[in-house]
Image: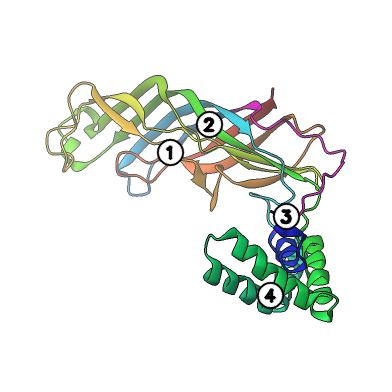
Amino acid sequence: MRNKLAHPAVAAVAVMAVVVLAGTVHAADFAPAGAKATLSVEYRFVSKGSDAPSKDGVFKVREWDVLRSAEVVAVLEATKPQPMPAMHPVDAQQQAKQRKQQKQVAQSAAQMAPMMAGAQAIVAKCGEDEKCIERETMKIGAGLAGTQQLDDTLKSGRETAAVLKPGADRYQRWQGKSQTGRFEITERWHVVHKDPICMSLPRGQCTHDLERKGGGEFAPSGSAAMMEIDTQGSTMMLALPGPIGLLAYTETPSTDEPSGTHDTPTPKGPVKSQMPLRLAGDNKSVGGPIKLALKGGWRSQSGQQVVNLGAGGWHSVSGEPGKLVVKWRFVAQ
């Protein structure tokens, strides 16, 4: 049996259906697909200070010293380099190319419509009969040989293949695969107040202290961390791995407040509890993704972010001001 692709009609269909990928030589420095990298992140929230006595004279002393920290290490894996971004925004030149491709495909589809209808008719008539397919294809080929329709169709196929040909690889994305980490909580809160219920106590005031301590390992887990480099723009898009899970701690209150001071009675003795590590404030989040300029070779990058946050509040008062400092480092193996 002769090769059916030798017939002009089938050749035209093949030109439309298959985009020939040409190898491109470029100087971009990429890691092999499957290569590993680590993205290490340190989250450190600190809030320390004291308030002046309240204007109504109820609160005499309010002091706090809060440290909440977490360290996360994510393992990332390199994906195959691509000419188009997965995390970076598509630039104006790329958008123009996409519009051109869409227009060319629509034009080529219209040009190919009669021939595609003929090919569908052959399939409907012949089914799996190869001799029938060959015979009918030869008829179409003979009828189109030397015609302007065939020339236009072949030209459209070549133009479409040229427009759809991908450019040189420019981007490489690193996808998080797993992560581990640890955390620590150390807090001290001290309040002296003159609630009327405290009048029976010395100096007519109550003292309430609270300590929180905790620490440990996060359970190993998958990771949503991602990083993408743009070798042409010398930039990176970064999505940091956050702590997965709550931070466990033991809360120990100490107070001389009489019963009934609070609607919810103060617990006696240590109490186990949990809290999340806040990663957003100032109308921004440290998680990302964020766009950053590459500093030197992309295989080793580091940076820092600072976000103003409140400590969360305690003793019926709004959150105390603090700062979350996030330090990260990416290292490709």
Q: Nearer the viewer, mark 1 or mark 2?
A: 2
Disc on res. 3: 3
Of helix, strand and loop, which mostly describes the magenta segment? loop
Q: Alpha carbon of mark 3 to alpha carbon of mark 1: how far? A: 75 Å
* Residue situated furthest top in the rendering: 216
- Location of residue 288 by image quarter: top right
Horizontal placement of 89 versus 319: left or right?
right
Going from N to C along the chain, the mark reached first, 1 or 4, is 4
Q: Nearer the viewer, mark 3 or mark 1?
A: 3
Q: Secondary structure at mark 2?
A: strand
Q: Nearer the viewer, mark 1 or mark 4?
A: 4
Disc on res. 115: 4
Q: Few, some or many C-alpha atoms within 10 Å of disc 3 (few <14, some 14-19, many ≥20)?
A: few
Q: Secondary structure at mark 3?
A: loop
Q: Nearer the viewer, mark 4 or mark 3?
A: 3
Location of the C terminus by quadrant is top right
Horizontal placement of 186 versus 126: left or right?
left
Amino acid under label 3? Asn
